[in-house]
Image (spheres, helix red, strand yellow):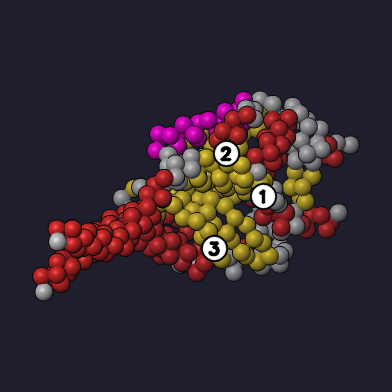
Amino acid sequence: MGKVIGLLTKSILIIVLVLFCSAYSWQEREEATPTEEKMKAHVEKVLEMWNEGNLAIVDELFAPQVVVHYSASHEDIKGLEGVKQWVTNTRATFPDFTKTFDETIMAGNIFVARWSINATNTGPIPSPQGEIPPTGKKMHISGISISKEENGKIVEEWVIYNVLDTMMQLGFTLVPPQSQQP
Amino acid sequence: MVYAIKEKRMKKVIKMIIRIIPPLMLILLCCAFTLQEKEKKVLTEEEIKTLAERTLEVWNKGDIALIDELYTVEVVRHECDMPEDIIGRDAFKNMLKDIRTAFPDLNLAMDELIIKGNRMVMRWTWTGTNTGPMAGQLPTGKKIQVPGVSIVRIVDGKIAEVWDYYNQAVLLQQLGFTLVPPQVEKQE
């Protein structure tokens, strides 16, 4: 009987030790949960805004004073109306616009994402030379966004990608400086 | 008699040791598993900042030797202006040489550095004067200023993977290239 109790005690001690050891490793992983949840919610909202054109989400995600530095635009995009116009215009040129995230990083109040876009150009393309009729071409591009939040809303964002790649996929032609000379 | 008791005790001790060994191994294995992850060289935020600053030296001084120190042998660079990935230190060295040939005064300035775990995100501005040939084009003599961003994955203290993004249209327009829309082409 004494032997059994001794063995039981020993076993329990060992199990507790092993559990403690495991709990220690688990703890580190669980710490990431609140950030991951926050990131997941953010990602879902961004995707709904872009892929479904839900403009109500703009008010949820962005602060009224937001400034977006966007590769495809010489001027910064400013304010909630600016962002709504940006989403509307993009979806008018590419009605089947589909954004997916390849990697997301949440560092404090900064959200960084590597994304891909698949879209077909079935709407007119705005350009400085005037509207260009739809090309019907499919495009696939990737890029990076950096969004800075204050009080849970985005105040500044950088959206950086190779616009040239998009234009070439839509059938634009690149003319080198030399060939312009007579 | 005394000898027999000693033998009995010995047997008991051996039995106990045998009984203890499996759980002990389990604990050791558990610890080893945790330690293994920590064994890899993990850089502190301060060390990652230094690493980021040193990558600028690679670009700005053309310090090719520094590539061996800062990047893994099989480093992969995903460049938004190249259809294929740049794989390995030598390929990166060649890419750097080409860019510094086209822009000998190339300067990459760090605008912001974001660090999270084994990732660093760098916002940068690339300036330079095109006084050398670029991809078969004669030097234009023009100055460029292009913003961009890189996501960098660090493994064992070295850069293992880089995603570089910037708008190449801005770069080429500053050099005097023009983009002709599809339908304008058809009218010609």
By secondary structure, the bulk of the magenta-drawn segment is best described as helix
- Give the structural element (helix, strand or loop) at label 1: loop
Q: Tell whether position B101 is magenta.
A: no
Cα gap from disc 1 to disc 2, whole angstroms: 15 Å
Q: Who is closer to the viewer here, A14 or B7?
A: B7
Tag 1 near tag 2, CB within 8 Å: no
Span of residues in magenta: B44-61
Residue B40: x percent and y percent? 44, 45
> Disc 1 sits on a residue from what chain?
B
Q: Toward which corner of the image does residue B168 lie, by quadrant?
A: top right
- Circle 2: residue type: Tyr
* Local SS, label 3: strand
For residue B56: magenta? Answer: yes
In the displayed structure, B149 sits above or below B4; it is above
Quarter of the picture containing the C terminus of chain A is top right
Q: 10 Å neighbourhood of mark 2: few (<14), some, or many (≥20)? A: many
Q: Nearer the viewer, mark 3 or mark 1?
A: 1
Q: Amino acid at mark 3?
A: Lys
**Hey, which residue is sitting farthest right in the picture?**
A182
In the displayed structure, would residue A60 be above or below residue B72? below
Of all residues shown, which one is farthest toward the front? B1
Q: Which residue is mark 1?
A: B85
Q: Which residue is denoted by mark 3 in the rendering?
A: A99
Q: Is residue A118 visible?
A: yes
The residue beneath circle 2 is: B71
Which residue is found at the position 39% from the left and 47% from the top? B38
For the point 33% across and 58% down, the residue is B25
Q: Nearer the N terminus, badge 1 or badge 2?
A: 2
Label 3 neighbourhood size at 10 Å, few (<14), some (14-19), many (20+)? many
* Callout in the foreground (3, 2): 2
- Give the chain letter at badge 3: A
